[in-house]
Image (cartoon, rainbow, N blue to C red):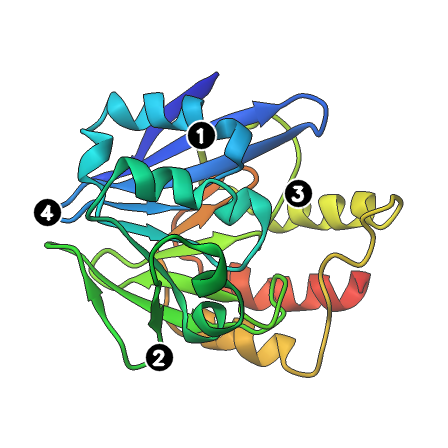
Amino acid sequence: MTTIHEIAPDLFRLSIYVLDFDMQFNHFLVRDEEPLLFHAGFKGMFPALREAVATLMDPTKLRHIAWSHFESDEIGALNHWLELAPQAQPVCTFVGKLVSVDDFSIRPARGMTAEDVLTTGKYRYRFHRSPHLPHGWDAGVLFEETRKTLFCSDLFHHFGDVAPVTSSDLIGPARKAMQQMQQGPLADYLPYTRQTEGVLRSLAALKPETLAVMHGSSYIGPGERLLTDLAGVIKENF
């Protein structure tokens, strides 16, 4: 079952809760002249997500499929979406395009550098590189400059079938999730390096007003402090 919630004008959160993991898998649809989907999702979730998108728009009209880093819950169903939407293009970091995506995808990706801007109509997007944060050399986070939405991927990951949005602090739930992950087979899923604090401070400098979180509640409000505080929590746990 997919739940749909409009977390900002034209921005919809499509969420599938998996009880076995006690985790939400969130995908974000932007309705605009050139619609954008952030997170292609697992292959197995594609039918449910396709139906959810179809309640909001014609899914064959998608133009951009974007994600943070090469991982199954972010990119697994990419080719299904590309087959469904003939005008859609994959969008990722330039490193992601070179090292993984163009070999995997049935159509070449648009690999974005820091100077590149993607315009969907009313909205403007840039990829900000964040190597190994949350995971992978190819990682980046997408920032929509018009309404200041940061698509966070696994940053601020937390467990539970939680509310679609919150204005409360995400640091507590994120800290608890890190501690829980460190007790299991997926320990050390977030690296802490000498670049971690600098990357998060550069994202904080964007002053996002919405944090679109992949696993857990999205955040509405000033996101600057949460991003700077997150650096300390990652250092504390990793």
Distance between the alpha carbons at the discs numbered 1 and 3? 28 Å
Q: Residue 112 versus residue 127: which sits nearer the camera?
A: 112
Q: Is residue 15 above or below residue 110?
A: above
The dot on residue 173 is: 3
Q: Which tag, 1 or 3, sits closer to the chain's start?
A: 1
Q: Which mark is residue 185?
A: none
Q: Which residue in the structure is indicated by mark 2?
A: 114
Residue tagged by mark 1?
46
Q: Nearer the viewer, mark 4 or mark 3?
A: 4
Please, what is the three-letter code of the amino acid marked with disc 1? Phe
Report how far apart the C-alphas of labels 3 and 2 lie in the structure.
Answer: 31 Å
Q: Which residue is mark 4?
A: 33
Task: State the residue at coordinates (34%, 62%).
Answer: 108
Q: Can you give x and y, in whole percent of width and height, for residue 181 in the image?
A: 80, 46
Q: Is residue 197 left or right of residue 31?
A: right
Taking 68 as reference, is 157 above or below it?
above
Q: Identify the residue shown where x is 38% and y is 34%.
A: 13
